[in-house]
């Protein structure tokens, strides 16, 4: 499968330092920063540093090291922000999601995961019926 990555997308510019961001965490293969238009009291984006368009591209072509680092970064952000609902952390929970393609309503064509929390988030999607 050939994926077309546009290196002029906004997250590529953030990763190159051309656009500022409010960083929450940085690892070898991931950068987490606050969303510019938050849809919840906590809204953080975790972006893979590698040039992957979406989750499918990432899973097809990323190294195991990148995949592990990226997923661990997501867990580190939820812990750092105090969202984990387990007994050790006592947070109130969160939602992670990654939009892909037209029906996923993906705006920025660079793999990223949204972390949302800080309020009760409602249903995952609107019911169609
Ligand atoms: P998508 O629809 O692609 O899953 O989500 C893209 C997200 O990126 C949106 O929530 C949008 O608010 C956020 N975003 C777009 N441009 C910028 C930017 O320049 N800086 C930051 N921090 N977030 C951005």
Image: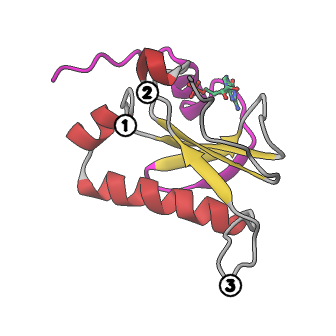
* Quadrant, the C terminus: top right
Secondary structure at badge 1 equals: helix
The region drawn magenta spans 1-29
Residue at which label 3 appears: 87
Callout 2 touching callout 1 (CB < 8 Å): yes
Q: Is residue 23 above or below residue 15?
A: below
Q: Distance between the residues labelled 2 and 1?
A: 7 Å
Secondary structure at badge 3 equals: loop
Q: Residue at x 81, y 54 (%)?
A: 118
Callout 3 touching callout 1 (CB < 8 Å): no
Callout 2 touching callout 3 (CB < 8 Å): no
Residue 7 visible:
no
Q: How far apart are marks 2 and 3 (CA)?
A: 33 Å
Mark before the other along the chain sequence, 3 or 1: 1
Residue at which label 2 appears: 100
Q: Is residue 34 magenta?
A: no
Q: Is residue 108 above or below residue 38?
A: above
- Structure colour scheme: secondary structure
Mark before the other along the chain sequence, 2 or 3: 3
Q: Does the magenta stretch include residue 16?
A: yes
Question: Is label 3 or label 1 in front?
Answer: 3
């Amino acid at each position: 499968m050939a994926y077309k990555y546009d290196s002029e997308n906004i997250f590529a510019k953030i990763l190159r330092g051309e656009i500022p961001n409010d960083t929450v965490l940085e690892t070898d293969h991931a950068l987490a920063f606050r969303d510019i238009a938050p849809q919840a009291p906590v809204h953080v984006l975790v972006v893979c540093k590698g040039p992957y368009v979406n989750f499918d591209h990432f899973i097809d072509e990323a190294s195991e090291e990148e995949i592990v680092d990226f997923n661990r970064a997501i867990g580190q952000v939820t812990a750092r922000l105090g969202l984990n609902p387990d007994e050790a952390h006592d947070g109130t929970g969160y939602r992670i999601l990654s939009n892909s393609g037209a029906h996923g309503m993906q705006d920025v064509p660079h793999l990223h995961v949204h972390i949302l929390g800080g309020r009760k988030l409602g249903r995952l999607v609107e019911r169609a019926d």
